[in-house]
Image: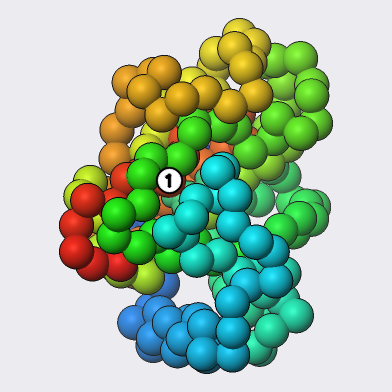
Amino acid sequence: MLSVEEHVSEIEANGFSIAQGMIPDDLCDEIIEELTRLENIGPPALPANEFTGYKTLRYFDLLNEGEVWQRVATHEPMVEVIRGVLGRDMLLSTMGSATIDPGETAQAIHCDDQLYEMARPHKHLVCNTMWALSDFTEANGATRLVPGSHKFPDYADVTLPPDAHETIPAEMPKGSICFVVGTCYHGGGANVSDERR
Ligand SMILES: O=C(O)CCC(=O)C(=O)O
């Protein structure tokens, strides 16, 4: 297990860092149970589109749902790493789920802070986390990352085709958290397996 400082230096060097075993098993199970509950209630409020994926199930505004999401948002080991990147005071801007079903194609490569339209390089504005509630493998759609792209001088475009840059899959076992700064290009992977990611 890496220390907070080691995760922060990896993020500074590569734009992302993976923390294996950062989500306790019982918390993983509770989140999966909650996502199953949401799915049983009905489809997400927002319709799917090309960017979010037609075979990806996404729920947004999760803090309005079960209590478990409050514990997700304040999960101390995660918060400590984000504080190391963004500083002590920060805001949670959005929290959602992305369940990638078999047959989904790769998402466009993008940066999560591009809506701010700030000239690069700039201070870190965003540090997102991807929580692996199943093993993330290249075949089942592990997030694709462009290592070092947080240092790209300026946005080539708002979003890019999945093959615009060489990417690596964020393969990680269930229970891991992948930290990604807002300037790092990434996108959901294609799911060519027969299992959900
Ligand atoms: O689910 C993923 O692997 C990444 C999703 C993502 O980057 C996004 O929807 O903005």
Q: Is residue 180 above or below residue 99?
A: above
Q: Nearer the viewer, residue 163 or 92?
A: 163
Q: Is residue 189 left or right of residue 37?
A: left
* Residue under the point 34% across and 82% down: 25
- Which residue appears at 69% of the width and 64% of the height? 46
Q: Quadrant of the N terminus?
A: bottom left
Q: Is residue 184 visible?
A: no
User: At 62% from the left edge and 45% from the top edge, which residue is drawn?
Assistant: 127
Residue at image point 59% right, 32% down: 111
- Which residue is under mark 1? 188
> Residue 140: horizontal and vertical position, in percent?
25, 55
Q: From the viewer's side, name the closer residue of 3 and 125.
A: 125
Q: Please tell me how crowded label 1 is: few (under 14), some (14-19), or many (20+) other residues with Cα within 10 Å.
A: many
Q: x, y (%) of residue 118?
A: 79, 21
Q: Secondary structure at mark 1?
A: loop
Q: Position of residue 125 (x, y in %)?
A: 73, 37
Residue 107 higher or lower than 83, as above or below: above
- Viewer-side residue, 4 vs 107: 107
Disc 1 marks a residue whose amino acid type is: Gly
- Is 184 positioned to the left or the right of 172 in the image? right
Q: How many marks?
A: 1
Ligand 1 neighbours mark 1 (CB distance < 8 Å): yes
Residue 37, position as x, y percentages in the image = 52, 90
